[in-house]
Amino acid sequence: MRMDASLEERQQQGRRDELASLLKQVDACRRCPIGSTRTKVVCGVGNPNSPLMIVGEGPGENEDQKGEPFVGRAGELLTKMLAAIGLRREDVFITNTIKCRATMSEGGRVANRAPSPDEMSNCREYLDRELAIVKPRVILALGAPAAKSFLGRDFSITRQRGIWYAGPNGTDLIVTFHPAYILRQTGGEINAVKKLVWSDLLAVRAKLDECAAAKDETSQEESEGDVPTALSFDFQ
Ligand code: URA
């Protein structure tokens, strides 16, 4: 049956409460040395009832300062990518494989680095908890580290992006290039990469529409006279 508004609000609040208590747990975590060097932990944000979860690599400098994923330049591009398929940032749930900024010293300054396998495995429990709370229908992994965390270390982003996989608990999972990688492209490479990313985004849009239609069909069968709307994202 189509969920009524107050039930959905209560479900959303329940999920927000669970995410808030997860945030407290992650905030107290010191499993990795970066747990002591970070400014703020960066857990997932967005709509906890969203059918789409976006999983990036890990927080950078801006995210570390703000305690929110994808708020720097890569985040701005991600927001544009979502808008291109008719999604607002606040419609989706955005998180990372690790919740603390991974840093290294480079030329005397602190720079971002890719998460280590140990950091990813220490943090996996928290990503799994987010998945269990939000229960997305679709996971979009951004970049090779996020893809490898789900699909194994042999995953090749150039050969295997844009393909549907069975992710955690069988959730549909697809990989595209990380927005920071897109921003690093120059010359003719930009359009080539953008074209690939665009086709991946369209695949996500189509999958979400498919999920919404399937949900609506079930609702229609279960509830006579209840007219479902296409592209609704309130179907958890
Ligand atoms: N890159 C990521 O992978 N995650 C962020 O939150 C920001 C940049």
Image (cartoon, rainbow, N blue to C red):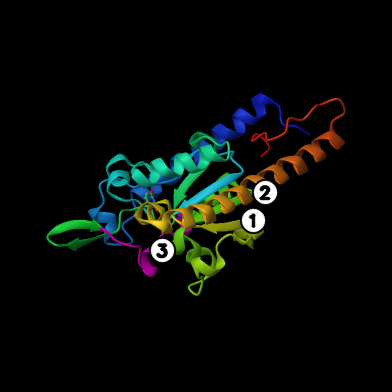
Mark 2 or mark 3: name the one nearer the start of the chain: 3
Q: Is residue 181 magenta?
A: no
Q: Where is the C terminus found, in terms of image quarters? A: top right
Q: Nearer the viewer, mark 2 or mark 3?
A: 2
Q: Which residue is mark 3?
A: 120
In the displayed image of the protein, which residue is found farthest to the left? 108
* Count of marks placed on residues: 3
Q: Residues within 10 Å of mark 1 (few under 14, many from 20)?
A: some
SS type, badge 3? helix
Alpha-carbon distance for marks 2 and 1? 9 Å
Q: Quadrant of residue 117?
A: bottom left
Q: Position of residue 151 (x, y in %)?
A: 54, 67
SS type, badge 2? helix
Q: Nearer the viewer, residue 162 or 125?
A: 162
Q: Which residue is mark 2?
A: 207
| Amino acid type, label 3 | Met
Q: Is mark 1 within 8 Å of ligand 1?
A: no
Direction from residue 7 to residue 90 in the image, left or right: left
Q: Which residue is mark 1?
A: 172
Q: Position of residue 79 (x, y in %)?
A: 45, 39
In the displayed image of the protein, which residue is found farthest to the front? 188
- For the residues labelled 2 and 1, say whether their Cβ atoms are less than 8 Å apart: yes
Direction from residue 155 to residue 71 in the image, left or right: left
Direction from residue 214 to residue 32 in the image, left or right: left
Q: Residue at x 72, y 33 (%)?
A: 230
Q: Residue at x 30, y 61 (%)?
A: 113
The relative height of residue 23 versus residue 222 in the rendered view (above or below) is below
Q: Which residues are magenta?
A: 112-126
Q: Residue at x 30, y 58 (%)?
A: 102
Q: Is mark 2 within 8 Å of ligand 1?
A: no
